Image (cartoon, rainbow, N blue to C red):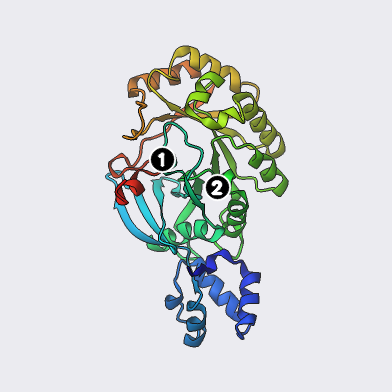
Amino acid sequence: MKKALSDLNLEKLKELCVTLGEKPFRATQLYEGINSGKELTEMTNLPSTFVEKLSNEYTAQGVSILKTLVSSDGTRKYLFLLNDGNIIEGVLMKYKYGNTICVSTQVGCRMNCAFCASGLDGLVRNLTSGEILSEVLTVNKSLGGTLKKREITNIVLMGSGEPFDNYDNVAEFLRLVNNEKGLNISYRNISLSTCGLLTGVDRLIEDKLFVTLTFSLHAPTDEIRNDIMPINKAFNTKMVIEAAKKYFNATGRRIVFEYSLIQGVNDSEPCAKRLAELVKGFPAHINLIALNYVKERSLTGTSAEKVKKFQGYLEKLGVSCTIRRTMGEDISGACGQLRRKYIGK
């Protein structure tokens, strides 16, 4: 399998150029081409002999767009083909403030949350930092964006995979996409969602990668959370809340908790009261989610009327909360759904 040059920062590209007998300034040209979403053959400012040497072992990007589906609401779902033949997904959501891309961090997932399609195949492998970056770069280019005038304004790491289960590559991706000579996307415009693999929280703080941190909570008690999220047996609800407070104290950033409402499981008024008790005492926001239907799972989402009622319970208790706008339902917008359809699972 050919390696992706998108894995390399500018200094490493300079080292590669020197190794191949090229002048160091070629690295800047190469870096700009990569971060413009181009493949090697599109970098016409590079000597053809240099491109040929690179092409023996490398591609510029770690992914290519295999298929694009466009929803009636403007949401775009992408199937990305990796250099080894694996397939991952990404979603582009258009808002008034700009374009947000949801990227995957792993092929599959080993967390096996009861409501998610991503974990149905288990974990196939981790994505490299350059593969994650290429999800952003190739979509930015497909929208007409460039390195100097990008179309992607925000990133959410909420696609297939648990970001903290691939911490080293995710951390390097954050550095690459934030680099002032690259896309230069601010950490404040990047959200990372974890199901509660809490070892990653301390590492984010230590590495000063102060993105917006989102915890997939989805239940107010250990009894419920144990049933729908196996990770809770290692990192329970109390530990999640403590980690959230620790991150807030270190960063001053408001914490977001995701809460997918499941009919008859976590959508009652007592659940709302317990949830309000959990998050009181520090700036937190609840993002209520109407559960996406996954045919391989047995869970049913709460009705729109009851979701609204649950929101009302929380607001009466003084909790900041919103209902996430449903996007891309007609194109299998939820994580893992389109990939499984494509590969015939």
Question: Disc 1 residue type?
Answer: Leu
Hey, which quadrant is residue 329 in on the image? top left
Give residue 261's position: percent from left, percent from top: 42, 25
Residue hosting label 2:
190
Count numbered badges in the picture: 2
Residue 193: percent from left, percent from top: 53, 40
- Estimate how packed mark 2 is, as few (under 14), some (14 to 19) or many (20 or more) residues with alpha carbons within 10 Å: many
Against 99, is 116 above or below?
Answer: above
The kind of secondary structure element at disc 1 is: helix
Q: Is residue 122 left or right of residue 177?
A: left
Q: Residue at x 40, y 48 (%)?
A: 91
User: Which residue: 60% across, 49% down?
Assistant: 187
Q: Which residue is mark 1?
A: 120
Q: Residue at image x 60%, y 26%? A: 236
* CA neighbours of label 1 inside 10 A, class few (<14), some (14 to 19), many (20+): many
Q: Residue at x 55, y 47 (%)?
A: 190
Spatial CA distance of label 1 from label 2 is: 27 Å
Residue kind at label 2, given as amino acid type? Ile
